[in-house]
Amino acid sequence: MSGETPPPVAAYFESINTEDFDRLETLWTDDVTLRAVGQKPRQGRDAVMAYFRPLFARWAKHLDTPTRVITSANVSVVEVSFIGTTSAGKELTFDAVDVFDLSGDRISALSTWYDLHWLVKQV
């Protein structure tokens, strides 16, 4: 990784990689906003967690690895390499970009960017 990874961002990747959703839930502000590719925007901790809890159900294995981190003031942009195996046994690798807005030690907004069209065709 290049650059300093803010603690909430590091904890986010640790949480999603281990599917520790209880920990993930503590990382959001009450009014967090999530913009995920192909999804309606979600507002609030409960709505964001409703997105994340079933997110990896189709994956037998998955790992999001930050490869580059750019942080300025309260925003971190993270280039991510995703490696996963679907529940059907297909291995996939793709790149993504996550943009985090931070408020103290919490995440107040997250937007995720990747080629959804390609991914849907693969799974």
Image (cartoon, helix red, strand yellow):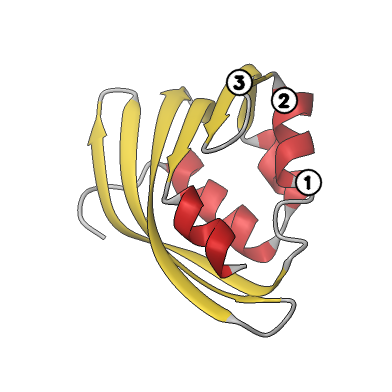
- Label 1 or label 2, whichever lies nearer to me, is 2
Q: Residue at x 67, y 44 (%)?
A: 24
Left or right of residue 119: residue 53: right
Does residue 28 appear left or right of residue 51 in this picture?
left
- Mark 1, residue position: 22
Q: Is residue 120 above or below residue 100?
A: below
Please name which of the two marks, 3 or 1, marks the residue nearer to the observer.
3
Tag 2: Cα neighbours inside 10 Å, few (<14), some, or many (≥20)? some
Query: In the rendered structure, which disc, 3 or 1, sits on the residue that comes first in sequence?
Result: 1
46 and 24: which is toward the camera: 46
- Left or right, 60 with respect to 7, comes to right
Q: Position of residue 14 (x, y in %)?
A: 56, 58
Q: How much space separates mark 3 and mark 1, taking CA atoms?
A: 16 Å
Q: Is residue 122 above or below residue 71?
A: below
Q: Do the CB atoms of the residues marked 3 and 2 lie less than 8 Å apart? A: yes
| Rendered image quadrant of residue 27 | top right
